[in-house]
Image: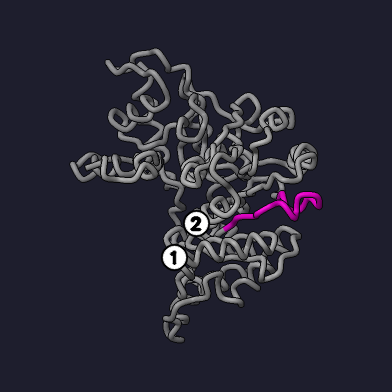
Amino acid sequence: MINKLSKRINNLPISATLAMAAKARELKENGIDIIGLSLGEPDFNTPDFIKNAAIKAIEDNYNSYTPVDGYVDLKKSICKKFKRDNNLEYKPDQIVVSTGAKQSIANTVQVLVNPGDDVLLVAPYWVSYSAIVTLAEGNPIEIRSDISSDFKITPVQLQNSITSKTKLVIINSPNNPSGSVYSEEEYKALAKVLEKYPDIFILSDEIYEHINYGIPHFSFAKIPSMYDRTITVNGLAKAFAMTGWRVGYIGAPNWIAKACTKMQGQITSGTNCIAQRACIAALEAPVSEIKYMIDEFKSRKELIINLLKDIKGFKLNEPKGAFYVFPDISSFFGKTLKKKKINNASDFAIYLLEKAHVATVTGEAFGSPNNIRISYAASTENIKNAIQRIKNAVED
């Protein structure tokens, strides 16, 4: 019956991260011990002070429809957060609260991109960017980087990718999947190129902002010439271990915020009332409240890097943020491992799942066909066991 479905859905790819997680679950259900390092989900519990705020909201009888763009007091808290953490001035009417940062991104693309517009994706990029652009009937155009440039693009690459059809550029730092972080100087160099093209907008995905290991986070909208053209996306999922609470938000020019509210009003309307109340507590708290999670991620990063360095054929960079490593495994292409021919990164990821019983994600889904993504948002024990399994599977 697939021919009865719309071309829109038939042409839409399945999320590679969710597909790998589904395959891993299927094997687990068949009694196979799978270590999952495919999903970008903190393994911490949501902090108690946030949970207590949610409990209080229930007791205070928050149970009605919420404003489409979010509670005013939550939007004020977001404005305070932008000022405190990013030195960005936003007013409540420039904020839209959504059901996760993914919806924030989708709203933005839907209200800005016309059929046939080009959207530049700075690769490697989060898997859903391309699909979201496709849904808006735009053209996702990759600007590729690799491990030799620490997975960052240059101003020359950006300049060479811009055409008369370019409408939007999507950037992400700290980066999923590479963990790379753009410095203030690097972003300003890219902005110099974009200053020549006033009709191009920038979506800056900053969801991993606080999961940072040394390079100070810099918001693209902080560049004066970019403020009125930048949509800053953030959320609570990663840094606050609130993935299932589904709250994201944008700070944007007022006219874009209004358009996103209009779009959201016809799709989901307002975000969950209890989650919004909990988010006020999260955002009002000092960032030091979540430092213990960041410190643990840093420790795990150092562990997994040291373990992977011992595997012949894995080429690594040093991630400066997020909770992923993104090794180049192209040395295995064309080889046969335990009677399995490895032609590409997808073959390699499937091989690790089937032979090592470790779930990772192919870099092809992120615009980086020589890599795989490995999440270290997992226990130290699981990381050690997983990397040993991978080592055993790829070495004679």
Q: Dot 2: within a 10 Å radius of its alpha carbon, few (fewer than 14), some, or many (20 or more) residues? A: many
Q: Dot 1: within a 10 Å radius of its alpha carbon, few (fewer than 14), some, or many (20 or more) residues? A: few
Q: Is residue 301 visible?
A: no
User: In this view, which residue lies farthest toward the bottom?
Assistant: 60
Q: Name the kind of residue labelled 2 in the image.
A: Gln
Image-based side of 119 in relation to 33, left or right: right
Indicate which label's residue lies in the foreground, 1 or 2: 1
Task: Give the position of the N terminus as an image quadrant.
Answer: top left
Q: Position of residue 94 (x, y in %)?
A: 67, 65
Q: Nearer the viewer, residue 23 or 31?
A: 23
Q: Which label was assigned to residue 268?
A: 1
Q: Position of residue 256 (x, y in %)?
A: 64, 59
The stretch of residues the image draws in magenta is 218-234
Q: Position of residue 286 (x, y in %)?
A: 65, 67
- Report the Cα–Cα distance between label 1 and label 2: 9 Å
> Do labels 1 and 2 touch, CB within 8 Å?
yes
Q: Secondary structure at mark 2?
A: helix
Q: Secondary structure at mark 1?
A: loop
Image-based side of 98 in relation to 254, left or right: left
Q: Name the kind of residue labelled 1 in the image.
A: Thr
Q: Which label was assigned to residue 103?
A: 2
Q: Nearer the viewer, residue 225 or 324?
A: 225
Residue 269 is a magenta residue: no
